[in-house]
Amino acid sequence: MTATLLPTSDADPFGPEILEDPLPFHADLRDAGPVVHLSRYDVYAMGRYEHVHAALRDWQGFQSGAGVGLSNFRTEPPWRPPSLLLESDPPRHDAPRRVLAGILAPRELRRLREGWSAVADELVDALLAAGDEFDAVPALAEAFPLRVFPDAVGIPAEGRENLLPYGDFLFNAFGPHNDLVAAAAHRAPELGAWVNARCARDVLAPDGFGARIWAAADRGEITAEQAPLVVRSLLSAGVDTTVQALATVLHALATHPEQWRRLRAAPQLARVAFDEAIRWGSPVQTFFRTATTDVRVGDTVVPDGRKILMFLASANHDPRRWTDPGAFDLSRDPSGHLGFGFGIHQCVGQHVARLEAECLLTALARRVETIEIAGPTRRHHNNTMRAWGSLPMRVG
Amino acid sequence: MTDPGDALRVTAKDVVADGVVVLTLAHPSGARLADWTPGAHVDLHLPEGTTRQYSLCGDRFDAHTYRVGVLREPAGRGGSAYVHDVLAVGDTVGVGGPRNHFPLVPSERYLFVAGGIGITPLLPMVRQADLLGADWTLVYGGRRRGSMAFLDELQSHGDRVHVLPEDRHGRLDLPRWLGEPCDGVAIYCCGPGPLLDAVESACAGWPEHALRTERFVAREQGAPVRDRPFDVVLARTGATVTVGPDRTVLDAVRDAGVDVLSSCRQGTCGTCETDVLEGTPDHRDSLLGDDERAANDCMFPCVSRSCSDRLVLDL
């Protein structure tokens, strides 16, 4: 077999132009081939669904334990103790994942539904009482998760607003050390210390997710050293990601009035609407993996120890997998999208996010006939998340 | 798209001790299998109609095969005799799970105690403890050396493994191996009932949760596996969908126009969880415990099927 030249791109996927609108770059990436070398960072990249999906499942060949950002923990020290869920491989990954997957299983979340629906109703009622125009990012996408999720974890009420800049820094830190990281680096130690303090056993409410994590440590299912890191995973990846996921689905519905009408006619479509929005808007755009051996993908061998950037968002728009991928369409089956990752590291909190979205969308759909963008929208650039800074909306 | 019920093919059948065969199972298409952790088991839906649970004892770093060890049971009860006498390389068996009710927890030190075929779930645990650099010991009892499986594999672990056949060493001297109660040791025991009882007695003074056991009875499932079509009633509309042997409940329901979100299609992620209003599911997921299965109030339609003629789902 003749060796095929590895396609190379000198684009900067973490630069402001691509962060503002990544879709043209993703199309180029997919067209270039199954694996592309990103020369600016000397990493490999995958943008096609088939290959991203296969690599995410292949924890044996593409490890997370060397970090899921650009930084390679084999050669560079992590900026914080690595996540036991995100940045860990079997066998060390097994016990923390098992504990958290049990606590966040769909069956376990049923008891929260009624309370969260009531909070969503109350939030939307208060918002509508204040007028028919608002910024959906602070008023809904941020407000709702910050009300329900920290309560579910059981952290104290004060200071919860720290969760958003902490999440923003964390997801920036997965990328290169660029201006986005530098701008917030001065606050990272303070935010990290605040978050860590909220993972301690004595501050957590007795009936929350956090207390249940510590109870698992009492039963020996995880160690007492692991317990606060598992709680931290909830605070790190459970709030900012959901905020941006909710903003994404609100934006999708506000810009597709016919889909909003469909949701109003059939509110049980709320879950499908959320997952279709996660596919279409991909709030989590990328994650890195590291080759554990020389791994062949198509005609390319990714050498042992090298970083591979998985473009989840590109895979979610791959026309080889999705019909008319650019359309936000509630009649599509979004099952199998990669917006939550895939395989053993698939987002352990995905069911929580779905429940939050279902409660919020149902509350809106029952009260609001129309929803539309009411002014200039603004993206918030982040190295990993396709985030919203502002979404002015008008409801009628 | 995976086959409904995920039938796997027997690719190898090896005698590893007197009365013990190991089956190697793989997907007919070569597809990757659902991931598992040490201590996990699968339900084998045998062609002759019974379902048996067996621990996975292969290499989890091999994503394409499962290995299970099957002891011929003295009474010649259905499943094991079928596996030993009839099941052949090339045959297919339905597989449910994997599920894990016997997970390896993190610990500085492990004491593994195996009795006979109870070695099967401990084998991957031993490999994992070794990989983690933990301090571990395996005490392995059995009737005769020739009846004890996997001795060749265990040999590479050197003096951490103590092979103690009863015909030469008598019953296991548990107090000797356990020593004095202390913190920081996880004790795992799998084997016949009398051994488990003895270990439980011997561990009476140990810290709570130090001992974890798996009572090694290859449990029969209550209802026979059906290979005939069954009806699924979609309660919200009243529509009825017939599910044939060659498709999943998920696909049948979706073809009828009902949106059901899914993701892994292997019964591991929980996305397609669906309430069951009537009927008895044939559970094949990796998520529900035995009690949750017995409640029969929810199922995962991407892999699970039906034991009854009719299921009513909240869809």
Image: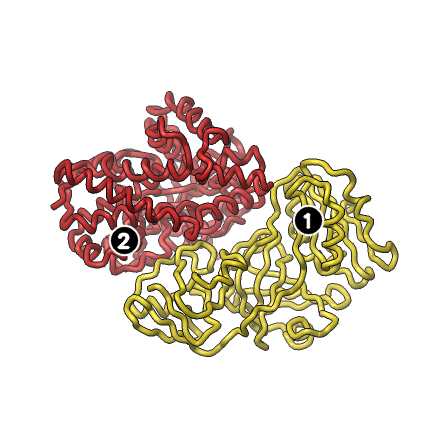
Chain colours: A red, B yellow
Give the number of the disc on residue A327.
none
Residue visible at 46% across and 60% down in the picture = B266
Residue B142 against residue A109 in the figure, above or below: below
Residue A12 can be seen in this image? no
Residue A340 can be seen in this image? yes
The chain that hosts pointer 2 is: A
Q: Point out residue A125 in the picture as x, y percentages from the top left corner.
A: 20, 42
The kind of secondary structure element at disc 2 is helix
| Quarter occupied by residue A22 | top left
Farthest residue toward the right? B168
In the image, what residue type sits under mark 2? Ala
The chain that hosts pointer 1 is: B
The kind of secondary structure element at disc 1 is strand
Farthest residue toward the bottom? B228
In the image, what residue type sits under mark 1? Tyr
Residue visible at 38% across and 72% down in the picture = B232
Q: Which residue is mark 2?
A: A270
Give the number of the disc on residue B188.
1
Closer to the camera, A174 or A209?
A209
Q: Point out residue B15 in the picture as x, y percentages from the top left corner.
A: 72, 67
Other-residue count near label 2 (Cα within 10 Å), few / some / many at <14 / 14–19 / ≥20? many
Closer to the camera, B236 or A272?
B236
Residue visible at 71% across and 48% down in the picture = B112
